[in-house]
Amino acid sequence: MPQLSSIPTRGRTLDHAAAVYDIVEPLIMLGKQAQYERDIVDLLQLQPSDRVLDLGCGTGTLTLSIAERLDPSMGGQATGIDAAAKMIRVARDKRPHPAAWYTPMAAEALDFEDASFDAVVSSLFFHHVDADLKLRAFRESFRVLKPGGKLIVADMHVPTTFFGTLVSHVSRWFFMQPEIGENIRGILPELMVKAGFAEPRLASRYFGYIAVFSTGKP
Ligand SMILES: C[S@@+](CC[C@H](N)C(=O)[O-])C[C@H]1O[C@@H](n2cnc3c(N)ncnc32)[C@H](O)[C@@H]1O
């Protein structure tokens, strides 16, 4: 198999965690990962022929759930991109699906044509990039979406519970990650609007620190 290379980015990539990511994530999601992903996929209101882009797809668990609702014979495809080549390698090796495709790419510099996707989705990616890259990734998402296309973003946001506040601030300082600080100050909705998206709707919340936003390209 050809060697995959990670993509240079200021984002915090997770090549170093690829081998253990699928063991650790279910623990972090407190047993609710399947429900969380189902809720995100439902928000996409997929048609079998849809083309969907998953930003910062990691090991591709969400991408695969989306692919399972698509029909490749009708053009349906779920594309997962991540700047970390080792994450892409794990995603590719996991469970090949005819409607799933993964490639190393930075979310702030998408190598796709304008208006080439029906939906863009991202889970727990935006707290890995600084405000400038967040905005660039939203602008790129806007560019590659068809008019009327959906954007679903699930990520850390202003915490609403004691547990959520604790997890948010401990993560921000334990990982020394100011990008998390931006999220918990509530920066994401305004950046989506700045990139051209309609005012995002808060669709659901998890654990008091993750918010799921739904918006679209007018
Ligand atoms: C916490 S993981 C989320 C993975 C997956 N979406 C999930 O929900 O489990 C964040 C991912 O963003 C990736 N990442 C960081 N900066 C990136 C960038 N600029 N472009 C694309 N991916 C990036 C990391 O390599 C990592 O796999």
Image (cartoon, helix red, strand yellow):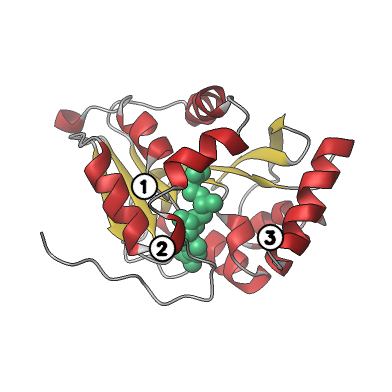
Q: Amino acid at mark 1?
A: Phe
Q: Quadrant of residue 170?
A: bottom right
**Answer yes or no: do the residues labelled 2 and 1 have beta carbons within 8 Å?**
no
Classify 162 as above or below 116: above
Distance, label 1 to label 3, CA atoms, is: 20 Å
Mark 3 highlights which residue?
191
Residue 54 appears at what percent x and percent y? 42, 47
Mark 3 or 2: in front is 2
Name which residue lies at 64% across and 70% down: 130
Label 1 neighbour load within 10 Å: few <14, some 14-19, many 20+: many
- The three-letter code of the residue at mark 2 reads Asp
Nearer-N-terminus badge (1/3): 1
Closer to the camera, 17 or 152?
17
Find residue 15 and name its label: 2
Mark 2 sits near ligand 1, with its Cβ under 8 Å away: yes
Graded by Cα atoms within 10 Å as few (under 14), some (14 to 19) or many (20 or more), the crowding at tag 2 reads some
| Residue visible at 47% across and 75% down in the picture | 9
CB at mark 1 closer than 8 A to ligand 1? no
Indicate left or right for 166 with 207 as reference.
right
Which of disc 1 and disc 2 is earlier in sequence?
2
Q: Is residue 140 visible?
A: no
Amino acid type shown at disc 3: Leu
For residue 34, side relative to residue 114 (left or right): right
The x, y position of residue 85, in whole percent, is 32, 63
Identify the residue under disc 1: 117
